[in-house]
Image (cartoon, rainbow, N blue to C red):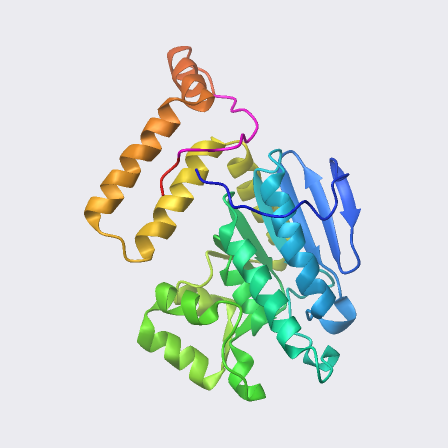
Amino acid sequence: MRRVGVAAPIVDVWKMGATSVEFLRVERSGGVVTVVMSRPEKKNAVNLAMWHELAETFTSIERAHADRVMVLTGDGGDFCSGADLASLTGGDTLDFMSDASEAARTLHAMTIPTIAKVDGVAVGAGWNLALGCDLVVATERARFSQIFVRRALSVDMGGSWLLPRLVGLQKAKEIAYFGDMYSAQEAADLGLVTRVCAPSEIDITVDSMAERLAAGPARALSLTKQLLNTAVDGGSMEQALRLESQAQVNNIGGEDAAEAKAAFLEKRSPVFGARAALSGAAG
């Protein structure tokens, strides 16, 4: 798979365990990297510095081949209340939006599976950060809104691209035009939340999903993600078949496929290796 060309990592001394930048915590365990947005006094509203940190952190994770799955979550009982508009001063709006857009772009470009772990509010740019992940797991008390119109703003952080693909154009317009608040179950019914669970169960639910993905065949998962993303962008059946063939050639030539075959013949569970740099992939 073609790797995204990116700058050097923000922190090149990250090891297993936990590290921090100013507004994020980054925790690593068993191939799962958890990024915690940490401005709990602001319900994790994102200021200019945090947008920059998110973009650089997503880029760093994409380059760290030991990271096989990313979980994105918030500190203090909320996911993210959106952009911190109060932190804006007169001259930095363009910089603010540029860094916000870069955070959305680098999240979308990640080739590993990503999970949003949502409790409390996920509104505005915060909801679109969650929707930028592959899977969204929410507690029953989570609440979601494309709140932009209530602030006399239009949708950002990729929401105008994500929503129509997830719910269709007409429903996306309804969600964006009114800025209504949706419960976790209402969002799940629309296909915008993958799983809803009790607050007491979200840790074990997300941990289980992340651990299963981290133990899976990294190359095949990454290629599957790219194939599905390409297909939803409007590719033809002929293109999908061509890209699938290229991906399978890539898979079959890899160590994970050899291990899966050996495990099948030996009647045992496969043990897949660390994520390796991918090349010559679908796309």
- Residue 47's place in the image compared with 213, above or below, is below
| Magenta portion: prevailing SS class | loop
Residue appearing at x 33%, y 30% in the figure: 248
Front residue (pair 186, 177) = 177
Query: In the rendered structure, which segment of residues is drawn in magenta?
Result: 270-280
Q: Tell me, yes or no, whether the highlighted magenta stretch contains residue 36.
A: no
Front residue (pair 189, 69) = 69
Residue appearing at x 61%, y 38% in the figure: 67
Is residue 139 at least partly visible in the picture? no
Q: Quadrant of residue 254 in the image?
A: top left
Measured as percent of width and height from the top left, residue 216 is found at 49, 32
Total numbered badges shown on the rendered structure: 0
- Residue 209's place in the image compared with 48, above or below, is above
Q: Seen in the image, is 237 located left or right of residue 71?
A: left
Q: Tell me, yes or no, whether the highlighted magenta stretch contains residue 273.
A: yes
Q: Quadrant of residue 107 in the image?
A: bottom right
- Residue 275's place in the image compared with 200, above or below, is above
Residue appearing at x 38%, y 28% in the figure: 251
Location of the N terminus (image quadrant): top left
Q: Seen in the image, is 271 located left or right of residue 228?
A: right
Measured as percent of width and height from the top left, residue 31 is found at 62, 35
Location of the C terminus (image quadrant): top left
Outermost top residue: 266
Measured as percent of width and height from the top left, residue 273 is found at 54, 24
Residue appearing at x 51%, y 67% in the figure: 184
